[in-house]
Amino acid sequence: MADLDTSRKTIAYDLGFKHRSKFSNWFTRLEGCSPRSFRDQLKALNVRNPDID
């Protein structure tokens, strides 16, 4: 999720989820917030994945 340029849909499918909603539910249980909220927090902190740049 730290790769802000990759869509949540792509991440969900890459992880084997057939539906983005299933990924979102799983992620929310794991992290305590939705994927969108998680990304918004990263953006607010201006965090980037160093492996991507």
Image (cartoon, rainbow, N blue to C red):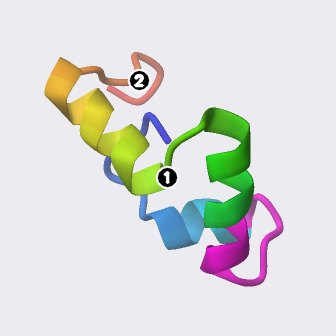
Pointer 2: what residue? 49
Furthest residue in direction bottom, as rendered: 19
Q: Hey, what amino acid is under mark 1?
A: Ser
x then y, percent, for residue 36: 38, 55
Would residue 46 be seen by someone viewing this image from the given angle?
Answer: no
Q: Nearer the N terminus, badge 2 or badge 1?
A: 1
- Quadrant that contains the C terminus: top left
Start-end of magenta stretch: 14-23
Would residue 44 be seen by someone viewing this image from the given angle?
Answer: yes
Q: Is residue 14 left or right of residue 42?
A: right
x then y, percent, for residue 10: 56, 68
Report helix, strand or loop for mark 1.
Answer: loop
Q: Is residue 36 left or right of residue 32?
A: left
Q: Hey, what amino acid is under mark 2?
A: Asn
On residue 22, which mark appears?
none
In which quadrant of the rendered view does residue 15 lie? bottom right
x then y, percent, for residue 20: 62, 76
Is residue 20 placed above or below 48 in the rendered structure?
Answer: below
Judge by depth and name the residue closer to the eye, 53 or 47.
47
Pointer 1: what residue? 34
- Asked whether residue 20 is drawn in magenta, I would say yes
In which quadrant of the rendered view does residue 49 lie? top left
Judge the density around disc 1: few (<14), some (14-19), many (≥20) Cα neighbours within 10 Å.
Answer: some
